[in-house]
């Protein structure tokens, strides 16, 4: 996989899977922009880890539509083009239906959908308009096994990722005529800040044992699949949802 000369925008690139993808793209020759919500320290640490030069960090809360537009415009202004969008930023909040108040329930649904689904949809819109003008591009969405397996304690998260899967399939159809291809990865649990508390808790061992490998994914393993879906040669996978879950949840 060679991304020499390609411009990549990764939302939520300050930590976890986004950071691993940023490093991997930079090692394959890309110029990488990472966005982050407010963790500037982590974003600057990621910048230090990237190969080569010309990379860019941008603070951008993707739940704010105008900010998403500014983020995309900044990348296009800086680099003259935008070849690959990775919709990776996401939140995972508990709001168990049998414990939380009605107000907490509504707030969690709103926050989760605004970031995980509508933020990603808005990034797709802004990026696609540039990609259509420039003659093509790639979009990779970072979804979750939870869309298929269920998220009993975080139902808005599961719904947001199911929505993201459907969005990716629809946009793959809408954008293929413009030489824009859309892929989705659906990881199970991954060793990142998002999952660290659960993995350290009493539930951790049972979670690892969901996979016959006895472990969860490393961020680099998800990053590899993101790069694969963004690669030139993977164009005809457009519309696919690639499971990255160590056979912990198999669907046909
Ligand atoms: P993470 O370590 O918690 O990092 C989340 C990233 O998203 C950070 O860069 C964060 O920025 C950014 N972010 C959060 N809200 C944002 C917002 N409103 N605007 C812009 N950026 C925002 O998460 P991760 O585990 O790497 O997860 C990455 C993706 O993989 C998510 O979409 C997640 O749902 C998905 N996923 C994760 C797992 C898992 O087990 N970890 C499993 C399946 C799918 P700051 O650093 O500034 O906070």
Image (cartoon, helix red, strand yellow):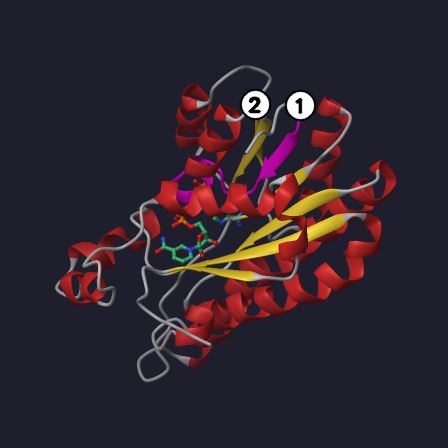
Q: Residues within 10 Å of mark 1 (few under 14, many from 20)?
A: few
Q: Nearer the viewer, residue 126 or 62?
A: 126
Magenta span: 6-19
Where, quadrant-wise, is the N terminus in this rendering?
top right
Residue that numbered label 2 is attached to: 29
Of 127 and 41, nearer the camera is 127
> Dots 1 and 2: beta carbons under 8 Å?
yes
Asked if residue 201 can be seen in this view, the reply is yes
- Residue 107, position in %: x, y? 49, 69
Asked whether 26 or 103 is in front, the reply is 26
Q: Is residue 116 left or right of residue 129?
A: left
Q: Identify the residue position indicated by label 1 in the image.
A: 5
Determine whether 185 is above or below 18 in the image. Answer: below
In terms of secondary structure, where does tag 1 sit?
loop
In which quarter of the view is residue 57 placed?
top right
Residue 7 in magenta stretch = yes
């Amino acid at each position: 996989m060679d991304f020499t000369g390609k411009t990549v925008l990764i939302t939520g690139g300050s930590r976890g899977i986004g950071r691993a993808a940023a490093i991997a793209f930079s090692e394959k020759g890309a110029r990488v922009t990472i966005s982050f919500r407010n963790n500037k320290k982590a974003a600057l640490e990621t910048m230090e880890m990237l190969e080569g030069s010309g990379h860019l960090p941008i603070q951008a809360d993707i739940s704010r539509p105008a900010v998403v537009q500014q983020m995309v415009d900044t990348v296009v202004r800086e680099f003259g083009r935008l070849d690959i969008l990775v919709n990776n930023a996401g939140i995972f909040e508990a709001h168990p239906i049998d414990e939380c108040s009605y107000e907490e329930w509504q707030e969690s649904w709103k926050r989760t959908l605004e970031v995980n689904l509508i933020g990603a949809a808005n990034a797709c819109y802004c990026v696609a308009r540039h990609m259509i003008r420039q003659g093509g591009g790639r979009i990779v969405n970072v979804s979750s096994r939870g869309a298929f397996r269920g998220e009993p304690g975080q139902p808005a998260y599961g719904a947001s990722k199911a929505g993201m899967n459907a969005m990716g399939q629809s946009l793959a159809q809408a954008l293929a005529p413009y030489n824009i291809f859309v892929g989705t990865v659906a990881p199970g649990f991954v060793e990142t800040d998002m999952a660290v508390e659960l993995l350290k808790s009493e539930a951790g061992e049972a979670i690892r044992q969901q996979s016959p490998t006895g472990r969860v994914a490393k961020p680099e393993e998800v990053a590899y699949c993101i790069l694969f879906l963004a690669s030139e040669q993977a164009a005809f996978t457009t519309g696919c949802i690639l499971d990255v879950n160590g056979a912990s949840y198999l669907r046909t």
